Amino acid sequence: MLASFFLLLLCGLLGGCVLSVCPSVCSCSGGHRDADCSSRGLTKLPRGLQHNIRFLNLSFNSLQVLGGELGHYAQLRSLDLSFNHLESLPPVLPRSLWDIKASWNHLRSLDKNDTAFHWNLKQLDLSHNELERIVFINNTLLSVKSLNLSHNRFWTVPTNMPQNLESIDLSFNYLVQILPGSLDRLPRLVKLYLHANHFSSLTGGVFDKLTALETITLGDNPWACEEENITGILQWAEKTGATVLGCPCFTRPVCGQNHLATRDGEPEPAPLTEETLWVNSRGEGYDDVSTSRTIMVTSTYEENPSLYQTGLLVWTSSTKSHSVSEDTSTVKPKMASSVSNAQTVEPQMKIVTLNFLLCTIATSIWQEGGVTIFGQKWPLPESVIATKIFIYFFLQINAELIKSSQTY
C-alpha cells in the first residue's frame, strides 16, 4: 500500500511538471509564466504554452493572422506583437491584459470591438502601422494611460479617446485638423505630441479643455503664418500654462508660461511613453526597438526643439513613413533585476523530491514482492515493467527540471 501511495503521488508530480514544460521554440522564466518567443520565424502561435502565462513576447516573427487562441490565457498581462505582418488585431484577446504592443505591423483600422472590453488595459502601442481610422466607444478603456498612434496615416485626430489618458502620441501622421470637441473629454491629459504633421491652422479654443496639460509639441507643421486664422493658436501658445515645444510660425523654439521651468539648469525632458522593459529567460532586459527609437527622437526634440526648426536636423517624409536624418540606433540593453531566491530554489526542491519518491517506490516494490494499485496486486515481473516506465518518465522530467533550474 505504501508503494501505491507513492506511485500516485509521483504521477501527480510528473503530470504537474509536464504542464509547465516550455515550448521548444521559446525560452521561459518565472516558473514558465514569462515566455519569450521572439525572432523565431513563427507563422502561428506556438503550442504548449502554459495556461497561466503572464508575459508573452511574439515580436520579430512572421505572424499574419492570429485567431482566438490567445483568449484562453486568462492571466496574460503583457503581450508584444510588434514587428510582424498583422493586418488586424487578434479578434479575441484576454481581458486581463495591461499592456499591448502591436507596432511595426500593417494594421489598417481599429474597430470598436477590438478594444471594447479591455477594462484593465493601461498602455496601447499601435505606432508604425497603416492606421487611417480608429473607433473608440464612450466610457471604455478607462484604465488606459498611454496611447501611441505615431507614424500612421491619420488625417484627423480620433474622437472618443479614452477619457483617463495621460499621454497621447500622434506625431508623424498626416493630421490637418482637430474636430471641435475631440479633446474636450481628456481632463487628465498631461502630454500631447502633434509634431511632424500637416497642420496649417487650428481652431481657437481647441486645447482649452486640457486643464492638466504640461507638454505639447507643435513643431514641423506647415503653419499658414500669413493667414488671419493663425492668430488664435499663436495667442494660445504664448499664454498657456503648458510648455509648447516648437512654437507655431517659428516664433521661438519653446513658448508657454512654464517654459522657463528647469532642472539643474537644463530643460526638463518628458519621455514619449513609459519604457516597458522585456526580461528574457537569461535575465537580460531589452527595450522594444520601436519604443527606444521613438523615445530617442522625441527626447531630442523636447530637449532642443530649435534644431528641428533651424534645419540642423531635417525631418523627411514619404508616402508611408517619416524618418530623421540623424542616427537613431537602438538603445543599449539594460540589465533587469535578478530573480528571487524562491524561484531559484523551486526547481531544485522538485528534483530532490522526485529522487526521494523514486527510491522509496523501488524499495517498497522489492520488499512487498510486487505493488498494489487500486486494490489489485501486481506480481513482481509486471511491477518491474511498470517501474521501468516510471523511471523513463522520471528521467525525462528530471532533465526538464534541471534545464529550467539553469535558466534562473
Image (tube, rainbow, N blue to C red):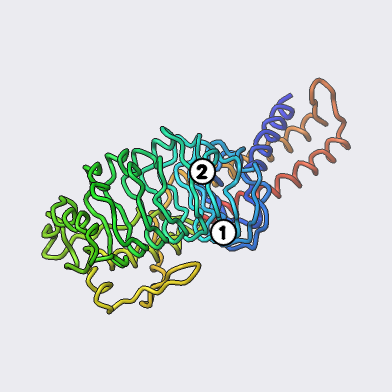
| Residue nearest the observer in this picture, 67 or 19 | 67
Q: Give the image quarter of residue 188.
A: top left
Q: Which residue is mark 1?
A: 106
Q: Amino acid at mark 2?
A: Arg
The quadrant in which residue 216 appears is bottom left
Q: Residues within 10 Å of mark 2 (few under 14, many from 20)?
A: many
Where does residue 69 sit, x and y in percent of width and height?
65, 42
Residue 391, relative to residue 248: is it above or below?
above
Q: Position of residue 343 (x, y in %)?
A: 48, 45
Q: Of 249 and 128, which appears nearest the observer?
A: 249
Sooner in the amino-acid sequence: mark 2 or mark 1? 2
Residue at image position (40%, 74%) is 316
Identify the disc placed on residue 237.
none
Q: Quadrant of residue 360?
A: top right
Type of amino acid at the residue the image marks with label 1: His
Q: Nearer the viewer, mark 2 or mark 1?
A: 1
Looking at the rendered image, the quarter that the N terminus falls into is top right
**Residue visible at 38% across and 68% down?**
331
Q: CA distance from mark 2 to mark 1?
A: 26 Å
Identify the element where label 1 is drawn. loop
In front here: 265 or 88?
A: 88
Would residue 54 be found to the left or right of residue 12 on screen? left
Left or right position of 355 against 193: right
Rendered location of residue 286, percent (x, y) = 43, 61
Q: Which residue is mark 2?
A: 54
